[in-house]
Image: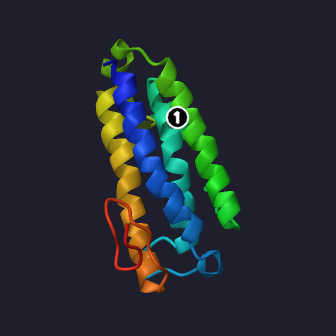
Amino acid sequence: MPLNEVFIAELENEAKATRRLLERVPIEKSDWQPHGKSMTMGRLASHVAEISGWVAHTLDADELDFSKMDYKPKIAKSNAELLEIFEENHKKALNSLKNAKDEEFMKPWTLRNGEHVYMTLPKAVVLRSFAYSHQIHHRGQLTVYMRMNDVPLPGIYGPTADEQM
């Protein structure tokens, strides 16, 4: 099985859970945060929605240099907008994965801010940690935010106290 098919299968599986979670984010509580140093719920939910776009950033380039970009985080104003951001990034990820040959996954990829290099790793490792695991981590964080606000949680890897499968 080609590597791209393995990454596509995992992306599609995780996307189901991400969609279910983003549908339930209480947008009216977008400014809520559990601690002053924590992201707000709206920023965190928007971050979860955008992370799958990092797949394309990883496969379609050999580096990401923060000093060459003017990133402005987007904060969705509705669940529909959250899902729109997610679907747009998911589509880009799928397109990049579908076009990637096995050798592309072994090429080095660098994350930097000008001369300061944070990491250089094979693209397959970056996809797994920087994109996939990163999204799973923040999705879990978002479930805690939602639980603290009495929002019923969907099953992700199995049933929850709110939703039996």
Q: Is residue 15 left or right of residue 104?
A: right
* Residue 123 coordinates in the image, percent (x, y): 35, 27
User: In the displayed structure, would residue 5 be above or below residue 131?
Assistant: above
Q: Residue at x 41, y 45 (%)?
A: 13
Q: Residue at x 56, y 71 (%)?
A: 25
Q: Is residue 140 left or right of residue 100?
A: left
Observer-nearest residue: 148 or 159?
A: 159
User: In the displayed structure, would residue 106 be above or below residue 33?
Assistant: above
* Residue 148 coordinates in the image, percent (x, y): 42, 84
Which amino acid type is marked by label 1? Ala
* Residue under label 1: 93
* Residue 36 coordinates in the image, percent (x, y): 45, 81
Q: Is residue 165 left or right of residue 56?
A: left
Callout count:
1
Q: Quadrant of the N terminus?
A: top left
Q: Quadrant of residue 120?
A: top left
Is residue 124 visible to us here? yes
Label 1 secondary element? helix
Is residue 72 visible to us here? no
User: In the displayed structure, would residue 101 be above or below residue 24?
Assistant: above
Q: Residue at x 50, y 64 (%)?
A: 21
Mark 1, residues whose alpha carbon is within 10 Å: few (<14), some, or many (≥20)? many
